[in-house]
């Protein structure tokens, strides 16, 4: 009862932003290749994240990749964000709408169990990119692919066509 959650969360966010300012935003392997490919092929991309908008916008600007995206959907702007409603695809449906696409035409790239479940429920293709969390096999068997890095998505996309 006496733990001051909001203060602790705010301090955690401050430390996180200080680290990013000092060390830069780490980029996942293959990210720049994938973003360049999407731009070259004129394939619109959206960010759909459970992260709060204030934090997400700062990180995207600091990383220098914001200009590659046509739309941004943040967790605190949604009724049902990924962690709150496991398997609910609302955030991905809204991202698809923002880029003028049917969700069934979209590819969701995720690194978490709730995200993969929501991506599958959205109705399009879902690719799991391994990061810090292992997604259970019973979830992955419904995903379109499980890849080691973002650069591998280019080959996957070209072979799916």
Image (cartoon, helix red, strand yellow):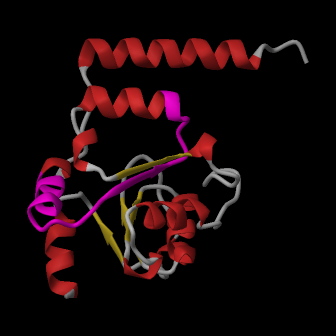
**Location of residue 60 in the rendering, given as x and y in whole percent from the top left corner:** 33, 34
Q: Residue at x 78, y 13 (%)?
A: 4
Residue 16 occupies which quadrant of the picture?
A: top left
Q: Is residue 61 left or right of residue 48?
A: left
Q: Quadrant of the N terminus?
A: top right
Residue 17 vertical position relative to residue 52 in the rendered view, above or below: above
The answer to which of 37 and 137 lies nearer the viewer is 37
| Bounds of the magenta segment | 33-54
* Left or right of residue 43, residue 118 in this image: right
Q: Which residue is at 33% across, 20% downward?
A: 20
39 or 140: nearer the viewer: 39
| In magenta stretch: residue 52 | yes
Quarter containing the C terminus: bottom left
Q: Is residue 60 above or below residue 161?
A: above
Q: Is residue 86 magenta?
A: no
Q: Residue lying farthest right?
A: 1
Residue farthest toward the bottom in the current orientation of the protein: 161
Report the residue at 31% width, 53% height from top.
Answer: 70
Q: Where is residue 72 drawn, in percent x and y?
A: 42, 48
Using the rendered view, name the quadrant where residue 11 is placed. Answer: top right
User: What percent of the width, then of the height, locates residue 33?
Assistant: 11, 54
Count the labels in the image. 0
When the figure is inspected, residue 154 is found, relative to residue 28, above or below; the finding is: below
Horizontal and vertical percent position of residue 74:
52, 44
**Residue 27 lies in what quarter of the image?**
top left
**75 vs 156: above or below:** above
């Amino acid at each position: 009862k006496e733990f001051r959650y909001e203060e602790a969360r705010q301090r955690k966010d401050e430390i996180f932003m200080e680290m990013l300012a000092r060390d830069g935003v780490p980029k996942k392997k293959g990210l720049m290749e994938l973003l360049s490919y999407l731009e070259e092929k004129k394939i619109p991309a959206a960010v759909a994240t459970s992260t709060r908008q204030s934090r997400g916008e700062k990180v995207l600007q600091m990383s220098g990749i914001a200009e590659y995206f046509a739309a941004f959907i943040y967790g605190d702007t949604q009724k049902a964000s990924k962690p709150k409603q496991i398997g609910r695809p609302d955030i991905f449906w809204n991202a698809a709408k923002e880029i003028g696409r049917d969700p069934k035409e979209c590819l969701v790239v995720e690194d978490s169990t709730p995200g993969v479940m929501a991506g599958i429920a959205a109705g399009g293709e879902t690719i799991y990119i391994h990061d810090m969390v292992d997604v259970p096999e019973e979830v992955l068997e419904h995903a379109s692919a499980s890849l080691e890095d973002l650069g591998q998505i280019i080959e996957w996309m070209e072979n799916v066509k």
